[in-house]
Image: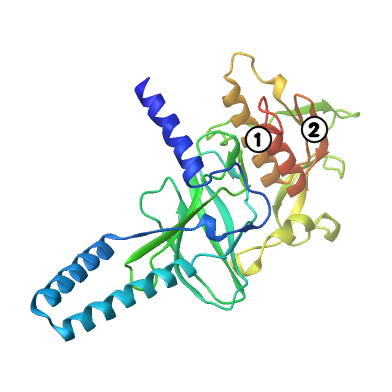
Amino acid sequence: MLAALTGLVRRKTDKWLFRMKGTEAGEVFLSQRRVFILPTGAGMGFFALLLVLLVGSINYNLGLGFGLTFLAGTCAVADMYLTYKNLAHLRLRAGRAQAVFAGEEANFELHLINRTRLDRYAIWIDFASQGTPRHAVDVAARAETVARLSMPTEERGWCPSPRVRLSTRFPLGLFTAWSYWQPDARVLVWPFPETEAPPLPMRGSASVDGIGHAGDDNFAGIRSYQPGDPMRHLAWRQIARLDPAFGGQLVTKHFEGGANEELVLDFDALPIFMDVELRLSRMARWVLDAEQRGLPYGFRIGAHQFAASSGDAHRAACLRALALHGIGEAA
């Protein structure tokens, strides 16, 4: 009870003191009211030294001591102003976030935009939950810099971006200025594919003559190109994905006779005693296997029913349906 009450008071205090809000869509402007500044540990030691210099100068009536004290104090005031200006008036915008499988790192692309004539140096940016910031960026005048922050994922579905903290101690490190930002960004997390899934559930029907023969209607996958293969059997879609500079090669479509096989990935066809998450993982593995072999496949789960196809768009639609199964599009 005490811990819950303490957490509630802290959240209310943060919301009032640091003006915490919900997700901030579009471009966010760091106005004066959003930038906070305090002395660092080095700054507190510097002010203690100034106090000692001032007391000594008064006691011994040292003119040079007064001059040194006031000069050092002026430098501290200038550092405070420059530290604040190094962060204020920046503009922030969330970028793209690529979908990942559960257990992988989710990467958030965050844009820092500087439309002023002042260069910004050594701006540390990271999620507020991180103790020590991991990324430092510079933003030139009238330019833009992209920072990429990552966090581990555990469960499928939508993974929203945590709150982001920006801070700087430039130029002398006597003060630290910081601000908070809640980007309107999220990453879609797909179910992690099952590591040892059974073979693809091919559905076969006997040929008319009952004799197996290779024909153009019985597509079985792709294989490496062999001399003598017809040009019309080249798998151009898969060839386009292979870069010869990285060991890519020609591949051709492979046909088998004797049966007409149809590949349909149906969630309801899996054993009902299996855990839902395991069934989703198996479906994800089958989607990847079918794409790797170049097999067109149908897909059924809940209200989602996709006709047999293949390619990046079909793959993404199937994995998205798996990721949001039982969660909903708006979750």
Question: Which residue is pictured at 19% across the width and 68% down the height?
Answer: 51
Locate residue 196, reporting x and y percent.
Answer: 53, 32
198 or 12: nearer the viewer: 12
Q: Nearer the viewer, mark 1 or mark 2?
A: 1
Q: Is residue 17 visible?
A: yes
86 or 329: nearer the viewer: 86
Q: Answer above or below: position of 84 versus 311.
A: below
Q: Is residue 68 left or right of residue 216?
A: left
Amino acid type at image mark 1: Trp
Locate residue 191, reporting x and y percent.
Answer: 59, 35
Secondary structure of the residue carrying tag 2 is: strand
- Report crowding for label 1: few under 14, some 14 to 19, many 20 or more residues within 10 A (C-alpha): many
* Most distant residue in the top direction: 273
Q: Is residue 143 left or right of residue 50?
A: right
Residue on which disc 2 sits: 261
266 or 253: nearer the viewer: 266
Quadrant in the rendering for residue 320? top right
Query: Alpha-carbon distance for marks 1 and 2?
Result: 16 Å
Amino acid type at image mark 2: Glu
Locate residue 313, reporting x and y percent.
Answer: 76, 47
92 or 148: nearer the viewer: 92
| For marks 1 and 2 on the same chain, the one whose residue lies earlier in the sequence | 2
The N terminus sits in image quarter: top left
Q: Is residue 137 visible?
A: no
Locate residue 315, reporting x and y percent.
Answer: 72, 43
* Most distant residue in the right direction: 208
Question: Which residue is pictured at 65% across the width and 34% down the height?
Answer: 323
Quadrant in the rendering for residue 211? top right
Question: Which residue is pictured at 53% across the width and 46% down the height?
Answer: 19
* Most distant residue in the bottom direction: 64
Q: Which mark is residue 286?
A: 1
The C terminus sits in image quarter: top right
